[in-house]
Amino acid sequence: MELGMIGLGKMGAYMTERLLKGGHQVVVYDRSAGPVQAAASLGATPSDSMEDLVAKLTSPRAVWVMVPAGAPAESVINGLADILAPEDTVIDGGNSNYKDSMRRASMLSEQGINFVDVGTSGGIWGLSEGYSMMVGGDKAVVNRLRPLFETLAPGPDKGWGHVGPSGTGHFVKMVHNGVEYALMQSYAEGFEILKAKDVFDLDLHQIAEIWRYGSVVRSWLLDLTAAALREDQDLSDIRGWVADSGEGRWTVAEAVDLDVPAPVITLSLLMRFVSRQDQSYAAKLLAALRNQFGGHAVLKESGHDE
């Protein structure tokens, strides 16, 4: 099957490579020439603009967009709206907000252009392991694109599925990432408790390896935990600063809008905020209050107790 791929960051480049290995024809475009040349060396057809990419595809065209959510995705999809024809399809495989995907689907449909939103998980391991894909859009359009999803997924009949109309793919992926936040936070807290028990001198990598097999908490995230602990259990070269890419916030906001209690996901998001504070003003105030009402010692910036 023929496909256009716009955006050759790690995910886009690996997806392109997996598609090429699966026998698909892929026309690629990226703002940077290097990734385009790298994809071309694997068998992709290079293009030097979105217009050039569209011209090299056979109608009805399918163009997969793998660029960051927000303004970049908006710019690319609006640009495609100006140059694609009726019956062509835009696929957004990034982490766009599902409300943006619903709006874009409506906008494109006015021009007869199809829109499919694909919540994609798998990261840098997707090339070898396959990608998990939550697909939203018209069922007939999704069925026409089935060969692409079957190639990108871990297997033709597993790891992907059509979950509903436009917007649902990115909605399900949003909640997926909220769950991911909570799972990661749970592993992090558990291993911190283990590490804090100095008297036992526990081998954290060994414990992670034990848990990986037969345990009810085994998972791919635990596999990655074991890999991270293998070389350096103290993680001495890593700063404890954790970013969030937006989906966790959107999940929490949606839970509030729907009156659904989601305390664990919410707290896991807030803990990421805590990780970015070198000095918490709230913690300073708590220490000051304990000193005020109970005369409890406070630790000054100099490091001395008072």
Image: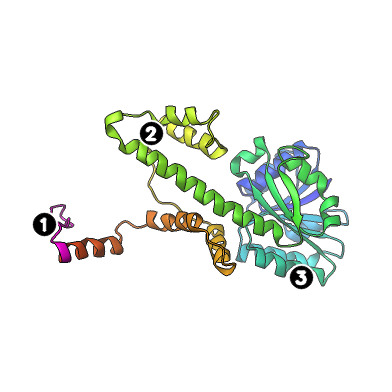
Nearer the camera: disc 1 or disc 3: 1
Q: Quadrant of the N terminus?
A: top right
Q: Residue 72 placed where, x, y %?
A: 62, 63
Q: Secondary structure at mark 1?
A: loop
Residue 235 has which mark? none
Residue 233 has which mark? 2
Q: Which residue is mark 3?
A: 106
Q: Secondary structure at mark 3?
A: helix
Part of the protein shown in magenta: 293-305
Whether residue 109 appears in magenta in the rendering, the answer is no
Badge 3: few (under 14), some or many (20 or more) residues near its Cα, within 10 Å? some
From the viewer's perspective, tell me whether residue 21 is left or right of residue 276.
right
Q: Tell me which numbered mark, 1 or 3, is placed earlier along the sequence.
A: 3
The amino acid pointed to by label 2 is Gln
Q: Residue 264 placed where, x, y %?
A: 48, 54
Q: Quadrant of the C terminus?
A: bottom left
Residue contact at pointers 2 and 3, CB within 8 angstroms: no
Nearer the camera: disc 1 or disc 2: 1
Whether residue 297 appears in magenta in the rendering, the answer is yes
